[in-house]
Image (cartoon, rainbow, N blue to C red):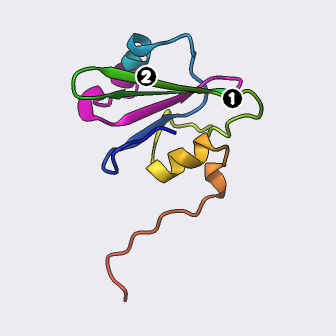
């Protein structure tokens, strides 16, 4: 399992991504299409059309890392949306990598007061 620092942000590219892309191609997607900072240390997750492969791109101090998981059976329950990218928690990323659906998870609530 991928080990990540608790303060890092996770972005999921919704829908499918061409898995022939490697570090350079995925980096261009992050910067040009999603307009996000590649060097922030954030994780950028991508899934293929068949939903059996996931790639996670991130910057680690002095170079890019590309983590990949290919399922031999089953499929990832990768979210589709009209949006292009979704910010999720690290817990939610773990759910996706374990085959769980984000739509069934409880939504995060934030309050400013108890009254």
Image-based side of 68 in relation to 6, left or right: right
Q: Nearer the viewer, residue 105 or 81?
A: 105
Q: Which mark is residue 66?
A: 2
Residue 71 sits inside the magenta stretch: no
The residue indicated by pointer 1 is 71
Residue 39 sits inside the magenta stretch: yes
Residue in the image at 60% along x and 30% along y: 15
Residue 113 placement: quadrant? bottom left
**What is the magenta range?**
29-50
**Residue 102, percent from left and from top:** 61, 50
Q: Quadrant of the C terminus?
A: bottom left
Return the residue found at the far right. Answer: 73
Residue in the image at 64% along x and 53% along y: 103
Return the residue found at the far bottom. Answer: 115
Reply above or below: 90 against 108. above
Residue in the image at 69% along x and 29% along y: 71
């Amino acid at each position: 399992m991928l080990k990540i620092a608790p303060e890092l942000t996770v972005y999921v590219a919704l829908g499918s991504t061409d898995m022939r892309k490697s570090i350079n191609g995925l980096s261009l997607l992050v910067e040009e299409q999603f307009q996000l900072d590649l060097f922030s240390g954030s994780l950028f997750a991508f899934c293929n059309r068949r939903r059996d492969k996931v790639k996670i791109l991130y910057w680690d101090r002095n170079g890019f890392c590309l983590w990949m998981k290919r399922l031999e059976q089953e499929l990832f329950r990768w979210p589709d949306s009209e949006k292009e990218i979704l910010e999720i928690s690290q817990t939610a990323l773990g759910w996706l990598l374990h085959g769980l659906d984000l739509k069934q998870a409880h939504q995060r609530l934030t309050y400013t007061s108890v009254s």
